[in-house]
Protein backbone atom coordinates (compact mmCIF):
# COMPACT_ATOMS: atom_id res chain seq x y z
CA UNK A 1 0.00 0.00 0.00
CA UNK A 2 1.33 3.42 -0.96
CA UNK A 3 3.01 5.36 1.83
CA UNK A 4 3.45 2.44 4.24
CA UNK A 5 5.93 3.40 6.96
CA UNK A 6 8.31 1.42 9.17
CA UNK A 7 8.45 3.64 12.26
CA UNK A 8 11.37 2.06 14.14
CA UNK A 9 14.67 0.77 12.75
CA UNK A 10 18.37 1.29 13.42
CA UNK A 11 21.63 1.25 11.50
CA UNK A 12 25.03 0.17 12.82
CA UNK A 13 28.45 1.00 11.43
CA UNK A 14 31.74 0.10 13.13
CA UNK A 15 33.29 3.32 11.80
CA UNK A 16 31.41 5.20 14.53
CA UNK A 17 32.53 5.12 18.15
CA UNK A 18 30.48 3.16 20.66
CA UNK A 19 29.13 5.13 23.62
CA UNK A 20 30.56 4.31 27.06
CA UNK A 21 27.00 3.68 28.28
CA UNK A 22 26.23 1.13 25.55
CA UNK A 23 25.17 -2.41 26.41
CA UNK A 24 24.29 -3.62 22.90
CA UNK A 25 27.02 -3.92 20.27
CA UNK A 26 25.34 -5.35 17.17
CA UNK A 27 27.21 -6.10 13.97
CA UNK A 28 27.09 -3.60 11.12
CA UNK A 29 23.64 -3.19 9.59
CA UNK A 30 23.57 -1.17 6.38
CA UNK A 31 21.04 0.73 4.31
CA UNK A 32 21.59 -1.71 1.43
CA UNK A 33 20.66 -4.61 3.69
CA UNK A 34 17.57 -2.84 4.94
CA UNK A 35 16.39 -1.95 1.44
CA UNK A 36 15.95 -5.67 0.73
CA UNK A 37 13.69 -5.94 3.80
CA UNK A 38 11.89 -2.76 2.78
CA UNK A 39 11.17 -4.10 -0.70
CA UNK A 40 9.92 -7.44 0.62
CA UNK A 41 7.52 -5.68 2.98
CA UNK A 42 6.52 -3.04 0.38
CA UNK A 43 7.38 -0.14 2.66
CA UNK A 44 7.85 3.34 1.22
CA UNK A 45 8.87 5.40 4.26
CA UNK A 46 11.08 4.95 7.31
CA UNK A 47 11.63 6.44 10.75
CA UNK A 48 15.25 5.91 11.75
CA UNK A 49 15.81 5.79 15.50
CA UNK A 50 19.07 6.47 17.31
CA UNK A 51 20.13 3.21 19.03
CA UNK A 52 21.64 3.16 22.50
CA UNK A 53 24.93 1.92 20.99
CA UNK A 54 25.95 5.45 19.95
CA UNK A 55 24.64 7.45 22.90
CA UNK A 56 24.39 11.15 21.98
CA UNK A 57 26.34 10.77 18.72
CA UNK A 58 23.58 10.77 16.10
CA UNK A 59 25.86 10.83 13.03
CA UNK A 60 25.37 7.22 11.94
CA UNK A 61 21.58 7.51 11.84
CA UNK A 62 21.66 10.95 10.21
CA UNK A 63 23.88 9.57 7.45
CA UNK A 64 21.38 6.77 6.88
CA UNK A 65 18.48 9.24 6.83
CA UNK A 66 20.21 11.21 4.08
CA UNK A 67 20.26 8.10 1.88
CA UNK A 68 16.48 7.81 2.03
CA UNK A 69 15.84 11.51 1.38
CA UNK A 70 12.38 12.87 2.11
CA UNK A 71 11.06 9.33 2.65
CA UNK A 72 12.90 9.29 5.99
CA UNK A 73 12.29 10.91 9.33
CA UNK A 74 14.40 10.53 12.44
CA UNK A 75 14.23 10.20 16.22
CA UNK A 76 17.53 11.15 17.82
CA UNK A 77 18.99 11.52 21.33
CA UNK A 78 19.52 15.04 22.63
CA UNK A 79 19.99 16.51 26.11
CA UNK A 80 20.07 19.92 27.72
CA UNK A 81 23.55 20.60 26.30
CA UNK A 82 22.18 20.37 22.74
CA UNK A 83 22.09 23.90 21.33
CA UNK A 84 19.13 25.58 19.65
CA UNK A 85 21.20 25.76 16.47
CA UNK A 86 21.64 21.98 16.56
CA UNK A 87 17.93 21.40 17.24
CA UNK A 88 17.13 23.64 14.27
CA UNK A 89 19.63 21.74 12.09
CA UNK A 90 18.25 18.35 13.12
CA UNK A 91 14.71 19.52 12.40
CA UNK A 92 15.76 20.66 8.92
CA UNK A 93 17.23 17.18 8.32
CA UNK A 94 13.92 15.49 9.18
CA UNK A 95 14.27 14.71 12.88
CA UNK A 96 10.89 14.75 14.59
CA UNK A 97 11.49 13.23 18.02
CA UNK A 98 13.82 12.85 20.99
CA UNK A 99 14.44 9.34 22.22
CA UNK A 100 14.50 8.28 25.87
CA UNK A 101 15.58 4.69 26.54
CA UNK A 102 14.94 4.12 30.26
CA UNK A 103 16.54 0.67 30.39
CA UNK A 104 20.19 -0.37 30.79
CA UNK A 105 22.33 1.25 28.11
CA UNK A 106 20.32 4.43 27.74
CA UNK A 107 22.38 7.62 27.41
CA UNK A 108 20.17 9.96 29.46
CA UNK A 109 17.88 9.51 32.44
CA UNK A 110 14.50 10.56 33.80
CA UNK A 111 15.96 13.84 35.09
CA UNK A 112 16.31 15.00 31.47
CA UNK A 113 12.73 14.23 30.43
CA UNK A 114 10.99 17.49 31.36
CA UNK A 115 13.84 19.84 30.37
CA UNK A 116 14.32 18.16 26.98
CA UNK A 117 10.56 18.13 26.34
CA UNK A 118 10.47 21.88 27.00
CA UNK A 119 13.40 22.45 24.62
CA UNK A 120 11.98 20.42 21.73
CA UNK A 121 8.37 21.63 21.98
CA UNK A 122 8.94 24.75 19.78
CA UNK A 123 10.27 22.47 17.02
CA UNK A 124 7.18 20.27 16.93
CA UNK A 125 9.07 17.20 18.12
CA UNK A 126 7.70 14.43 20.31
CA UNK A 127 9.25 12.29 23.03
CA UNK A 128 9.79 8.63 22.14
CA UNK A 129 9.93 6.56 25.31
CA UNK A 130 11.08 3.01 25.91
CA UNK A 131 10.74 1.66 29.43
CA UNK A 132 9.40 -1.34 31.27
CA UNK A 133 5.68 -0.65 30.85
CA UNK A 134 5.14 -1.83 34.41
CA UNK A 135 6.37 1.65 35.41
CA UNK A 136 3.64 3.48 33.53
CA UNK A 137 1.17 3.77 36.39
CA UNK A 138 3.81 5.31 38.65
CA UNK A 139 4.97 7.67 35.87
CA UNK A 140 1.48 8.57 34.64
CA UNK A 141 1.24 12.09 36.11
CA UNK A 142 4.76 12.97 34.96
CA UNK A 143 4.06 11.82 31.42
CA UNK A 144 0.71 13.59 31.12
CA UNK A 145 2.37 16.90 32.03
CA UNK A 146 4.79 16.85 29.08
CA UNK A 147 4.20 19.70 26.60
CA UNK A 148 4.71 17.41 23.58
CA UNK A 149 3.28 14.22 22.11
CA UNK A 150 4.52 10.93 23.53
CA UNK A 151 5.32 7.74 21.62
CA UNK A 152 5.57 4.52 23.66
CA UNK A 153 7.76 1.82 22.13
CA UNK A 154 7.15 -1.88 21.62
CA UNK A 155 3.53 -2.42 22.73
CA UNK A 156 4.46 -0.79 26.04
CA UNK A 157 7.23 -3.33 26.67
CA UNK A 158 5.61 -4.78 29.78
CA UNK A 159 8.27 -7.11 31.17
CA UNK A 160 6.90 -9.70 31.67
CA UNK A 161 3.52 -9.19 29.94
CA UNK A 162 0.56 -8.07 32.04
CA UNK A 163 -3.16 -8.61 31.72
CA UNK A 164 -5.50 -6.06 30.17
CA UNK A 165 -6.87 -5.22 33.62
CA UNK A 166 -3.43 -4.50 35.08
CA UNK A 167 -3.00 -0.92 36.37
CA UNK A 168 0.05 -0.41 34.16
CA UNK A 169 -1.83 -1.32 30.97
CA UNK A 170 -4.80 0.76 32.08
CA UNK A 171 -2.33 3.62 32.50
CA UNK A 172 -1.17 3.13 28.90
CA UNK A 173 -4.75 3.31 27.64
CA UNK A 174 -5.36 6.40 29.77
CA UNK A 175 -2.27 8.05 28.26
CA UNK A 176 -3.57 7.29 24.78
CA UNK A 177 -6.97 8.73 25.75
CA UNK A 178 -5.31 12.11 26.36
CA UNK A 179 -4.96 12.45 22.58
CA UNK A 180 -1.21 13.06 22.91
CA UNK A 181 0.14 9.50 23.09
CA UNK A 182 0.93 6.92 20.42
CA UNK A 183 1.94 3.24 20.78
CA UNK A 184 4.18 1.24 18.46
CA UNK A 185 3.14 -2.29 17.51
CA UNK A 186 6.67 -3.61 17.31
CA UNK A 187 9.26 -5.98 18.78
CA UNK A 188 6.95 -8.30 20.72
CA UNK A 189 10.02 -10.40 21.54
CA UNK A 190 11.26 -7.61 23.84
CA UNK A 191 8.58 -8.44 26.41
CA UNK A 192 7.11 -11.83 25.48
CA UNK A 193 8.17 -14.79 27.57
CA UNK A 194 7.74 -17.06 24.54
CA UNK A 195 10.68 -17.73 22.18
CA UNK A 196 10.83 -16.69 18.53
CA UNK A 197 10.13 -19.61 16.20
CA UNK A 198 9.43 -17.56 13.03
CA UNK A 199 5.73 -18.29 13.15
CA UNK A 200 3.19 -15.52 12.75
CA UNK A 201 1.45 -16.54 15.97
CA UNK A 202 4.61 -16.18 18.08
CA UNK A 203 4.32 -14.15 21.29
CA UNK A 204 0.70 -15.05 21.92
CA UNK A 205 1.05 -13.83 25.51
CA UNK A 206 0.80 -10.28 24.09
CA UNK A 207 -2.33 -10.98 22.04
CA UNK A 208 -4.81 -9.61 24.60
CA UNK A 209 -2.91 -6.31 24.85
CA UNK A 210 -2.60 -5.96 21.07
CA UNK A 211 -6.24 -6.87 20.47
CA UNK A 212 -7.35 -4.25 23.00
CA UNK A 213 -5.18 -1.55 21.43
CA UNK A 214 -6.23 -2.37 17.86
CA UNK A 215 -9.90 -2.49 18.81
CA UNK A 216 -10.01 0.59 21.03
CA UNK A 217 -7.38 3.03 19.77
CA UNK A 218 -6.32 2.20 16.17
CA UNK A 219 -5.99 5.93 15.43
CA UNK A 220 -3.04 6.07 17.85
CA UNK A 221 -1.06 3.03 16.71
CA UNK A 222 2.11 2.77 14.62
CA UNK A 223 3.88 -0.29 13.23
CA UNK A 224 7.58 -1.08 12.97
CA UNK A 225 10.05 -3.85 12.18
CA UNK A 226 12.66 -2.92 14.83
CA UNK A 227 15.20 -4.04 12.21
CA UNK A 228 17.89 -5.37 12.62
CA UNK A 229 16.38 -6.73 15.86
CA UNK A 230 19.33 -5.82 18.11
CA UNK A 231 20.04 -8.20 20.96
CA UNK A 232 18.02 -11.05 19.45
CA UNK A 233 19.78 -14.32 18.66
CA UNK A 234 16.93 -15.27 16.32
CA UNK A 235 15.53 -12.66 13.96
CA UNK A 236 11.99 -12.84 12.60
CA UNK A 237 11.85 -13.21 8.83
CA UNK A 238 10.22 -10.39 6.84
CA UNK A 239 7.39 -12.76 5.88
CA UNK A 240 6.81 -13.48 9.57
CA UNK A 241 6.57 -9.76 10.34
CA UNK A 242 4.03 -9.29 7.55
CA UNK A 243 1.91 -12.27 8.58
CA UNK A 244 2.11 -11.20 12.22
CA UNK A 245 0.79 -7.72 11.43
CA UNK A 246 -2.06 -9.15 9.36
CA UNK A 247 -2.97 -11.42 12.28
CA UNK A 248 -2.87 -8.52 14.74
CA UNK A 249 -4.84 -6.22 12.41
CA UNK A 250 -7.26 -8.29 10.31
CA UNK A 251 -9.20 -5.30 8.93
CA UNK A 252 -7.61 -3.78 5.77
CA UNK A 253 -8.88 -0.26 6.52
CA UNK A 254 -7.30 -0.37 9.97
CA UNK A 255 -4.03 -1.61 8.46
CA UNK A 256 -4.07 1.41 6.14
CA UNK A 257 -4.63 3.66 9.15
CA UNK A 258 -1.73 2.18 11.14
CA UNK A 259 0.75 1.79 8.26
CA UNK A 260 0.04 5.01 6.34
CA UNK A 261 -2.31 7.54 7.90
CA UNK A 262 -1.05 7.59 11.48
CA UNK A 263 2.68 7.91 10.67
CA UNK A 264 1.80 10.52 8.08
CA UNK A 265 0.18 12.64 10.79
CA UNK A 266 2.94 12.17 13.36
CA UNK A 267 6.13 12.26 11.29
CA UNK A 268 5.47 13.79 7.89
CA UNK A 269 3.33 16.81 8.73
CA UNK A 270 4.77 20.02 10.12
CA UNK A 271 3.80 20.34 13.81
CA UNK A 272 5.58 23.62 14.56
Image (tube, rainbow, N blue to C red):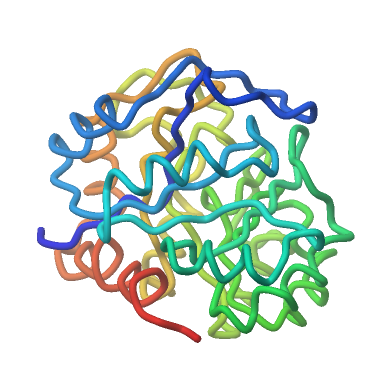
Q: Quadrant of residue 242?
A: top left
Residue occupying image coordinates x 65% and y 50%: 130
Q: Quadrant of residue 212?
A: bottom left
Residue occupying image coordinates x 74% and y 64%: 167
Q: Please tell me whether residue 245 is drawn above or below residue 252 in the rendered image.
A: above
Closer to the camera, 251 or 271? 271
Closer to the camera, 127 or 257? 127
* Residue 57 image offset from top left, x and y in percent: 64, 41
Residue occupying image coordinates x 82% and y 71%: 115
Which residue is the extreme one toward the right?
Answer: 111
Which residue is the extreme one toward the left?
Answer: 1
Q: Is residue 87 left or right of residue 206?
A: right
Q: Is residue 107 left or right of residue 182?
A: right
* Residue 138 image offset from top left, x and y in percent: 85, 64
Q: Please tell me whether residue 270 is drawn above or below residue 207 in the rendered image.
A: below
Q: Quadrant of residue 82?
A: bottom right
Quadrant in the picture for the N terminus: bottom left
Q: Is residue 160 left or right of residue 94?
A: right
How many marks do you count on the picture? 0
* Residue 113 image offset from top left, x and y in percent: 79, 64
Q: Please tell me whether residue 238 is drawn above or below residue 207 in the rendered image.
A: above
Amino acid sequence: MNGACDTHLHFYDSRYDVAPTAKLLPPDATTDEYRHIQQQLQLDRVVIVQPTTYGLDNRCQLAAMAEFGDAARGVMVVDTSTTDDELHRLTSLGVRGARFHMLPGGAIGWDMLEPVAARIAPYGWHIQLQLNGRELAARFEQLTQLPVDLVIDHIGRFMPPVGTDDPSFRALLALVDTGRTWVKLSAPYESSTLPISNLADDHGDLDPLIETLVTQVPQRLLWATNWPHPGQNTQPAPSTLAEQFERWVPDPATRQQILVDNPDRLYFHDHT
